Image (cartoon, rainbow, N blue to C red):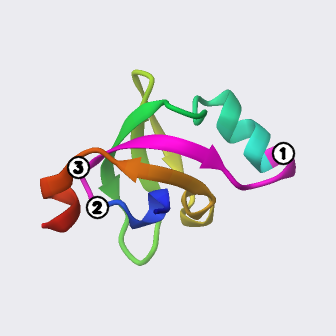
Amino acid sequence: MRLSDIPKEASFSVKRVTLKKEVGKRLADMGFTEGTRGQVVRKGFFRGPIQVRIRGYDILIRRYEAAGIEVEGTDADALHG
């Protein structure tokens, strides 16, 4: 599953970042590393940015960046509702 597919307020665990070069490195530097847990706080309208809470910080990332992050959902009810 991709981070861009996780619904608002659902928690997740990062599996891996599939983006290469500077973007992938920047995301890893911001805390998107294997096993890190986070939560989708909100999603922008019209495919806008996604606000993610990870390692105690709120970060806004672009949809295409979120699509390059593989995650596992940790909220079974939120993921299906």
Mark closest to the chain's N terminus, 1 or 2 = 2
Residue 45: where, in percent of width, then height? 36, 72
Residue occupying image coordinates x 68% and y 34%:
28
Quote the CA–CA distance across marks 2 and 3: 6 Å
In this orientation, which residue lies closer to the viewer: 59 or 8? 8
Q: Amino acid at mark 3?
A: Glu
- Element marked by disc 1: helix
Q: Amino acid at mark 1?
A: Glu
Residue 48 seen anywhere in this rendered image of the structure: yes
- Above-or-below relation of 22 to 33: below
Label of residue 9 in the image: 3
Residue occupying image coordinates x 63% and y 59%:
68
- Mark 2 Cα within 10 Å, few/some/many (few <14, many 20+)? some
Residue corresponding to mark 2: 7
Q: Amino acid at mark 2?
A: Pro
Mark closest to the chain's N terminus, 3 or 1 = 3
- Above-or-below relation of 34 to 6: above
Residue 24: where, in percent of width, then height? 75, 46
Quote the CA–CA distance across marks 3 and 1: 28 Å
Residue 3: where, in percent of width, then height? 47, 57
